[in-house]
Amino acid sequence: VTEVRSEHVKDGVIQTWLDDELPAGLATRVARHLDQCPTCQERGRKLSERTGRISLLLLSLDSEALDIDEVRAWVRPKPEPRASRKRIAADLREAPESPRAPTGEWPIAAPTAARSAARSRRDPAEAYPQLDLLSSLSPSVEAEPIPSEEPPLPPLSPVARASRAPRSFAPFQQALEVDSGSTPMEPVVPSPAAAQVRRLPRGDSRFRREQVVGVGLVFLLGVGLFAWLRSDRGGVDLGTTGDWVAEGGAEGEGGSVLEVELREGRLDVVLRAPHADVGVELQVGVGERVEIIAPLGSRYFPTQGKVEVDLDRAGPGTVYVRIPAIAREVNLIVGLRPVLTWTGGTYRMEEGVPAQTRGESVRIELPELDPLEF
Amino acid sequence: VLETLRPSGPSSNPGLLVDPDTILTDVFPGVHRYCLRRMANPAEGEAIARECLLRLAKANFQAGPEGPRVWLFRLATRMTREQAQGQSLSGPTGSTDPVTDADRVKEALRALEERERTLLLLRDEGLSYAEISEVLRIQPASVGTLLVVARQRLEDRLDPGGRLL
C-alpha cells in the first residue's frame, strides 16, 4: 500500500467515513489522515454541516404524523358479518320512522384512536457525531491511498448493426390496459423444465447490416434443470391474474420453461428489472408457443398477448426466448423500452442495442437502464 | 390481530422472520414519509404507501432475501416513480410559485435527477449504504460520492448564493 501523506481524501470517502460506512481498516486510515490534514478536516466539517442542513430542510416536507392505529386497521381482517348486521340494526333503531326499531341497546363502536404526537425525528446533531472526532484523533499515523470507489465499466460487446424498427408504443399501451387483472388469462402451460428443453433442428442464421436474421437452434442449458413452475400463491401479487415463479431444487440450477400462446400470432415479452447479470438470447424454434426460460427467482405474469418476466429477484443467468417460426410478431420490451421486434423471420433491433451471435442464436445486451427501472 | 398475519408455513429463511408489528411501527412510518415526500400530491403518496404495506401483508410479511425493509422501499420507489411518470415534471403544484419552505424544498427535489432525489430521501430515512445500493442497484462504494453530489446540487438549487432557507 502506497502512502499518500500529501494526497487528500475524496469527498465521497469522507462522507462515507462520516456515515460510518467505511470498512474498519480503511476508516482508521481515513481518520488518521483527517487528523493530520487540516484541508480534509475542513472539508469533512463542511460535509457534515451540509448533511445536517439538508436533513432539516427535508423535515419541512413533513406535515402530518402517521397514525399507527390507522395503519393497523389497513391490515386488520375484516369484521365478522354479525357485527355488520348489528350496525345496520342500530341505524334502523335510530331512524324514527323505522317500524323495526329494536328496543335493546346496541354497542357503540369505539372511537378511532387519537392521532399520535409528532413523530420522533433524528436530531441531525446526533446523527453526525463523527465530526467531533476530528479534533481528538491521533496525529501519528499517515494516510494511505483511497481505493477507487467505482470499478470501471466493462467493455461493451461487439455491436451488430441494427436498424431502427418502425414501432410505436400502441401495442404496449394496449397490453398495459389488458393487464388490469380483469382479463382472463390465456392458457399457460407450466411444465417441468427438464422435459421441455430439447435441441432443435439446425438452421441457418446470419447477420446483415440492416437486419439480423436469426434462425433457431436451441443450445443451452448444459446443466440439468430440476426447476418447475408453481403458482405463486404465497408470493407477492403484483396485480395480474396469474403469476408463476421459477424455482429450482438447488442453487445454481437453471430456470424454468414457460410456454405462452400467441394472440393472433403476436406476443409482447416484457422484462422487468433486469440487472447486470442477466442477458437475453433469442432463437427461432418449432411449435406454436413462445417458450421463455428465465433464471431462478424470475416471476412470470402471463396475460393475453403479453407475458411479463419480473427479474427483480432473479439470480444471474440468461433469459432465453424461443420464438415459434409461425409467429407473426414478437416484441421484446425491457422496462418500458422496446428493444427488439421479430417479424416474419427477421429480428429488428432498436438503434443502439448491442447484439452478437452466440452459437446460432442471437444474444442482445440489455440497454443501459435507469437504475430505478423495474 | 396481527398474529393472524404471521407466516403459517416454514420460511425459506427463518432468520428473516420479522414481527409484523415491528414492521408497522418501526419500518412503515419511514416508508410512508418517503412516499409522501416523493409525490407532489400527498394523497397519492399515502395511497402508494398503503399499497406497499398491503402487498407485504399479503405475502405474510416475508419479502425475500433482502428483508421487508429494503423490499418496501424498493417497491415504494418503483411505484412512486411510475406514478410520477404520468404527471408533469413539476407535478400538480408546479404551475404556481412556491410559497412555503416546503414548496421550495419540493421544487428543488423535483429538479434533481431521479437517482439523486431517491438517494437523498432514502438516506434521510436512515437506510444504510448497503440497503441503498440494494434499492438503487448501485455499488455501495459509490453511495457516499453520490450523496455528496446530490446534497450539493440540492443546496445549489435552493439558494445559489449559499444562503439557506
Image (spheres, coloured by chain):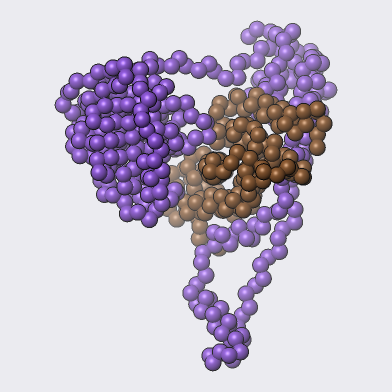
Chain colours: A purple, B brown
Quick check: A249 left or right of A58? left
Residue B26 place in picture, x, y as percent: 64, 49
Looking at the image, is A370 positioned above or below residue A120?
above
In this view, the residue in front, A363 or A112, is A363
Residue A151 visible? The answer is: yes
Residue B61 place in picture, x, y as percent: 51, 50
Looking at the image, is B42 positioned above or below residue A200?
below
In this view, the residue in front, A42 or A364, is A364
- Could you tell me which quadrant the N terminus of chain B lies in? bottom right
- Could you tell me which quadrant the C terminus of chain B lies in? top right
Q: Which residue is drawn at 53% across and 76% down?
A: A83
Residue A101 place in picture, x, y as percent: 56, 90
Residue A348 place in picture, x, y as percent: 32, 26
Q: Residue at x 34, y 45 (%)?
A: A302
Q: Which residue is drawn at 44% across and 36% down?
A: A336
For the image, the number of numbered tags is 0
Quick check: B92 left or right of A152? right
In this view, the residue in front, B87 or A258, is B87
User: Which quadrant of the structure image shows residue B12?
Assistant: top left
User: Which quadrant of the structure image shows residue A271?
Assistant: top left
Residue A250 visible? The answer is: no
User: Which quadrant of the structure image shows residue B157?
Assistant: top right
Q: Which residue is drawn at 59% across and 51% down?
A: B44
Looking at the image, is A93 positioned above or below residue A328?
below
